[in-house]
Amino acid sequence: MSTQTHTAAHTAAHTAARVTTIRTTTGERRTLRKVLWGAQILLAAFLFFASALPKFAGQADAVRTFEEIGWGQWLRYLTGTVEAAGAIGLVVPRLAGLAAAGLIGLMGGAALTQLLVLEPAWALLPVAFAVVFAAVAWDRRAESRRVLRLLKR
């Protein structure tokens, strides 16, 4: 086998291996994206309907919780607004990564509040949510960069 033939065969084999890797990676990425979409929809529904709306409606538990926190009811409305905006952002593909990044901050505050003021065992829930939001933010980083570039113009 000549050197050129050997080099061509090696290049072809290397290219075929790369294509297989790219296809596998693309397939895995599609699966991850589908799983994350399911999580985003469920978390958005939870944030909007089970968390933000009760805060806006003045549900007794929400009012009592924010009294325990001791910062006033304005924080209940602010938290509900951030949750509702984040929930909407999670289901808009262009905004999902940025919404997820913002919700990581909200979940960090919720976890600290649970640990320091309310019920420490409940801090695990916002931490788990933050992990999912981090995965969404990472997966949607290219879209987030595009949106941020458009805002800089």
Image (cartoon, grey):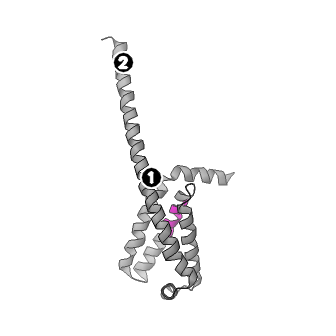
Circle 2 residue: 7
Please check the rendered image and state whether residue 53 is part of the magenta-colored stretch, yes or no. no
Give neighbour class at mark 1: few <14, some 14-19, many 20+ (Cα, 10 Å): some
Q: In the image, residue 11 lies at what x, y percent? A: 38, 23
Task: Give the label on residue 69, or none.
Answer: none
Q: Which residue is mark 1?
A: 33
**Which amino acid does the dot numbered 1 rest on?**
Arg
Residue interval drawn in magenta: 98-106
Res 75 seen here: no
Q: Residue furthest left?
A: 1
Q: Which numbered mark, 2 or 1, is in the foreground of this view?
A: 1
The amino acid type found where label 2 is placed reads Thr
Residue 108 visible in the shown view = yes
The crowding category of the residue bearing disc 2, from other C-alpha atoms within 10 Å (few below 14, some 14 to 19, many at least 20), is few
63 shown above or below 122: below
Question: Could you tell me what secondary structure mostly forms the magenta stretch?
Answer: helix
**Relative to 153, residue 52 above or below:** below
Q: Position of residue 14 (x, y in %)?
A: 36, 28
Residue drawn at x 47%, y 54% is: 138
Q: Name the residue located 45 percent from the left edge and 65 percent from the top edge.
A: 42
Residue 102 shown in magenta: yes
